[in-house]
Amino acid sequence: MPKTRVSGKASTGTNKTSKNGKGSRTPAAVTEDGKELFDPEKAQEEYNKRKKSQLESIKNTSADVLREMLYQMVLGRHFEQKCAEVYRIGKIGGFCHLYIGQEAISIGTQLQLEPRDFVITSYRDHVQAMVQGIAPEAVLAELYGRAGGNVGGKGGSMHMFSKEKNFYGGHGIVGGQIGVGTGMAFAQKYKESGGVTLCFFGEAAVNQGIFHESLNMAGLWNLPCIYICENNRYGMGTSQERAMSISSIAKKAESYGIAGEFVDGMDVMEVREATARAIERARSESRPTLLEIRAYRYMGHSMSDPGKYRSTDEIKRYQERDPIVLFKDSLKEAGVLDGKDFEKIDAEALAKVQEAVDFAENSPLPDESELLTDVYK
Amino acid sequence: MAELTIRDALNEALREELVRDENVFIMGEEVAEYDGAYKVTRGLWKDFGDKRVIDTPITELGFAAVGVGAAMAGLRPVIEFMTFNFSILASDQIINHAAKMLYMSNGQFNVPIVFRGPNGSAYQVSSQHSQALEAFYANFPGLKVVMPSTAADAKGLLKSAIRDDNPVVFLEQERMYGLKGEVPEDDDFTIPLGVADVKREGTDCTIVARSMTVPLAMQAAEHMESEYGVSVEVVDPRTIKPLDIDTIVASVKKTNRLVIAEESHAFASVGAEISHQVMENAFDYLDAPIKRVSTAETPMPYAKNLEELALPDVPKIIEAVKAVCYI
């Protein structure tokens, strides 16, 4: 399987990758726009073809890191399932967008960052906030609108932030954070910090003008920004096919002379490796990358989505390639972890989620004096 | 004191702040190699280079966003809009992002950024290039809004805006760039945001004016003094948000009459807000209903005579002063 199927001509990083010979493994069945990979059965065929190299990558990664990756994925899954549960009984107000099905993206990308790197994302931000180091207790208490919440009850589900952890927020305007993330990378370059920015957004945000404006500037000014399009197939209830004139988002990178790549978002190791290449390109060459990471949103757009625009059969087909199940199978096959370890990880994650619930339930409401604080500094 | 145009006073402020703080940079369309569409940034690119003075593509939303992200990450961007009409494309970043970041993040991420450029009408540039947007931006908590009317104010306020830890919308006026005034020769000269200035003392009637209407109000005041013996006080709030209502109220309590002259449209304007606050704070002191002089409720026409008819001018302000003085 190629590491880079679509490349910007101006990207030396991309060319390097193909010089490594990895490009020669392109299966003839996959066209340049990768359209057939939207089909889960086809994606699984491709996955099986690269299984051997995936197992090798697993063997080359420390067991502690692999365990942490699985733990974070399982924690994210249980956490979001708990959010759905407590949302339904009225514990959480407003919007609540869940990450179930997309865990491999956050875990595969963020767990290799350095303290000088920044992260910014959309409103589907709970798991990314936790992976970045914000306590699950603080995230859930924020959803509850409590004083102990990550931002004291002022932001809610869509607006987690941590300056300490370089988490520049969950943002609620589709695509708005793409421009802000570009500015964060601009500052990293200006200050010569050596840091890179991971800027997450969904595939529907690609249709906003800010996507084009941002990638143009990042390409023009050589900004160390990694644009991570989490293609979960739907912008609210509108499928990508109904909203975008072409099927490949990665290919759009060519328009800006930057590197672009499709990534199987159900394969956490593939995500991790593609991100590593993009990070290297950003750090050593100060060049941006556009990663189109294809996953699938199991739940509705938000908790208020009745989901009438797709069939349960479709959802089931995609769930056959569940990222946690695939990763567990590989870890088992590689002899890194076994069933007992999985049970232990599951229990740890469930206990952590319960701690978060207990904390949120017991956290007081924000004091009324907080209404007018932090409007101005 | 040195006599400078408003353009050069702004240029000095930018230059001094670029020297003072290496985190300050200027970004916008034609600000660098072209020397600024209105020459406010003249010479800065030559002296400070590509890193500090940056030409952008025509991509207002995009470069406003870069400014917001850079400010969150510790820089102090000065974002120039060639005119504020173009800021409307960027308003998602100014309003949805810059204005709310501190609050949404519970005080963790502030956005020390200045959005600056000419606001309001110029000379026959028609509908899409002649809008005064102060009321629009002043409506959003989290933003500060500044409107200088003299060279000294322009310099002192811009320096304060750049040093401020909040997003500041700094509204200049193209018609006023060439106006000259005395400016203190001190590279640490600043004027605090949120402090009004009494531009002319008087006892019989107050005119609250800002930006372009300040010089018009001054001429109207001279005329009222010489022709009618009416002593007019001119108050310039200088900062629209936060608004120094105390200085305005103190003036009204002294003169008992108020005219508000503004370049924006009247409906839901800053003048409407001032009028309301004066009613709340000095209702019993008013001897006549408050009058407003504003731009006509129409997109700006191109034809010179129609444009003049639409805009506030000295005769219209004189008429308003006469009306509140029952002359």
Image: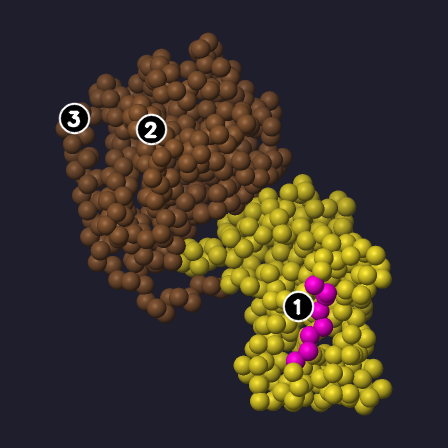
Chain colours: A brown, B yellow
Main SS of the magenta part reads strand
State the separation of the CA atoms marked 3 and 1: 72 Å
What secondary structure is found at the residue carrying circle 2? loop
Chain to which mark 2 belongs: A
Left or right: residue B223 versus residue A282 is right
Q: Pick the residue in front: B186 or A227.
A: A227
| Residue in the picture at 55% in, 50% down | B92
Instruction: Say few, some or many: other residues with alpha carbon within 10 Å of mark 1 (under 14 / 14 to 19 / 20 or more).
Output: some
Which residue carries the number 3 mark?
A339
Quick check: marks 3 and 1 in contact, CB under 8 Å? no
What secondary structure is found at the residue carrying circle 3? helix
Magenta residues, as a range? B290-297
Which residue carries the number 2 mark?
A311
State the separation of the CA atoms marked 2 and 1: 54 Å
Q: Pick the residue in front: A260 or A29.
A: A29
Which residue carries the number 1 mark?
B266
Q: Is residue B37 above or below residue A43?
A: below
Left or right: residue B16 versus residue A268 is right
| Residue in the picture at 52% in, 30% down | A244
Badge 3 and badge 2 in a common chain? yes
